[in-house]
Image (cartoon, rainbow, N blue to C red):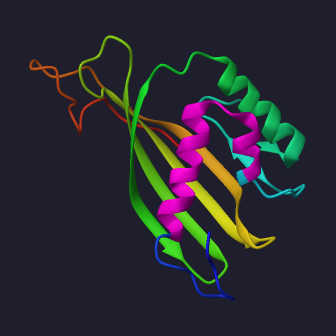
Amino acid sequence: MAHRGNALMPGDVDRCVEDYYAAFRAADIEQMMRLWGERPDIVCIHPGSPRAHRGVAEVMESWLLVFARELNIGIEPKIVGRHETGEIISVVIEEAITRPGDVAPTGTILISQTWRWLDDRWRLLFHHASHGRRSPPSQDGTFVPNGGGSTRH
């Protein structure tokens, strides 16, 4: 990704997100880990994870477990928040999830990521994904955006 000094280039945020989803959809551990900073302080939290995974070895192991599961869900990511500075990108993504047998999205995953310009490219430092709404489809089979009950933090 092009970057000059502390100036973000147009499209840097979108490219970071596109690269993440390319690695995720391919279930390619090498491609995924190339996105991450090679630092002991990186942190990754997956939906339903019992803990935060820290450091390169733990983060890689966590992605290996994710990729070992069947990933036959449909994912439609939408950036719903972003903050950009010269060396940091923070992004919030809402994924509409379509599970096998569903005709339309029936749930969401909420993601926040922090990227930093390191080693002449954008590197992922923090990734936190959690379950959002899960609701049954409406009578016509479409996602009910505000359905699915309440969420606790």
Position above or below: 53 against 99? below
Residue occupying the point 46% across, 68% down: 82
Find out whether residue 32 is within the magenta segment: yes
Q: Is residue 78 left or right of residue 22?
A: left
Residue 113 spot, x, y in % from top left: 59, 56
Front-most of residues 145 and 67: 67
Residue occupying the point 59% across, 32% down: 26
Position above or below: 70 against 96? above
Res. 57 image quadrant:
top right
Magenta segment main secondary structure: helix
Residue 139 spot, x, y in % from top left: 10, 18
Q: Is residue 54 left or right of residue 94?
A: right
Position above or below: 25 against 22? above
Assign the N terminus to one quadrant of the image: bottom right
Q: Is residue 101 left or right of residue 37?
A: left
Res. 135 image quadrant:
top left
Res. 58 image quadrant:
top right
| Count of numbered badges drawn on the protein | 0
Residue 68 spot, x, y in % from top left: 69, 19
Front-most of residues 28 and 117: 28
Residue occupying the point 85% across, 57% down: 41
Residue occupying the point 71% across, 30% down: 50
Position above or below: 80 against 67? below
Front-most of residues 46 and 35: 35
Residue ranking furthest to the top: 101
Residue ranking furthest to the front: 2
The part of the chain drawn in magenta is 12-34
Residue 33 spot, x, y in % from top left: 76, 45
Find out whether residue 31 is within the magenta segment: yes
